[in-house]
Amino acid sequence: MPRRARIVVAGYPMHVILRGIDRSAVFFEDHDRRFFLERLARAAEDESVAVHAYVLMGNHLHLLMTAAEAQGIAKVMKQVAQRYVQRLNRRYGRTGGLFEGRFRSSVIDADGYLLACMRYIELNPVRAAMVTAPGDYPWSSYRANALGEADPVVKPHALYAGLADAADARRAAYRRLFEDVLSEELLTQVRDCTNGGFVLGPPQMEQQVAAMLGRPVSKGTPGRPRKQREETEAGKQGALEL
């Protein structure tokens, strides 16, 4: 069965997950993580892609990005993954691939889900019981977004910038968002849409993106297509009337 084409739309945020093969480790030491982030910052700049949030875990990573052009994020991921694997293979005397064949992603409705997705990403180390607070983990965007730490990778989204006019007030408002627990329903939505390659947003956005791409962009209901079901039901009703 052919793979479902990835949903890519310029100007919409995308949540990206890249995992190690068979969920094996992809970062071994701190300098590996530093090199990855350096390459990410450079590639994002080259391809006009803004990185709003990220976290580097042991065997996978999450990114939240917006691209000026439809293929910008795919170009960034290809460039960073290739350079990183080449460097890692030389450093550790290994051969072969490191990451799964292709990254997983979902297009995000910024108004409804962007800030929640940022929290989802930056809270990964807390959910994994690696730290007790997101600021304790050095390999995420939380310290930049919430504490004002300099980070060449992070480029704020307009919704984040709109939390407050002054930088200190903006960061305080962002930290307050973390006082609310992300619901299990939201966690499931984010995971399912990203792993399945669907749009994370309201029906209106799904319809808009589907019209732009000319194909479905949501999971939908299992079974026969709606039109086919309706035609079948109409046929049954006609038979009864006869």
Image (cartoon, rainbow, N blue to C red):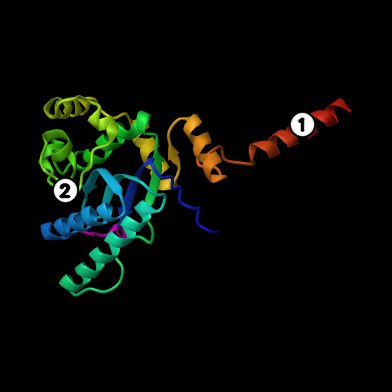
Name the residue that disc number 2 marks. 152
Query: What secondary structure prevails in the magenta region?
Result: loop
**For the point 22% across and 56% down, which residue is it?**
42
* Residue 21 lies in the magenta-colored region: yes
**For the point 14% across and 56% down, which residue is it?**
34
Quarter of the view holding residue 238:
top right
Q: Secondary structure at mark 1?
A: helix
Along the line of sight, the residue nearer the viewer: 67 or 117: 67
Along the line of sight, the residue nearer the viewer: 94 or 14: 14
In the rendered structure, the answer to whether residue 1 lies left or right of residue 191 reads right
Q: How many marks?
A: 2
Three-letter code, disc 1: Ala
Name the residue that disc number 1 marks. 234
Quadrant location of the N terminus? Answer: bottom right
Where does residue 233 sit, x and y in percent of width and height? 74, 32
* Whether residue 83 can be seen here: yes
Quarter of the view holding residue 214:
top right
Along the line of sight, the residue nearer the viewer: 198 or 239: 198
**For the point 38% across and 51% down, which residue is it?**
104
Where does residue 222 sit, x and y in percent of width and height? 57, 40
Quadrant location of the C terminus? Answer: top right
Which portion, as a residue range, is magenta?
A: 20-27
For marks 1 and 2, give the one nearer the viewer: 2
Alpha carbons under labels 1 and 2: distance apart: 60 Å
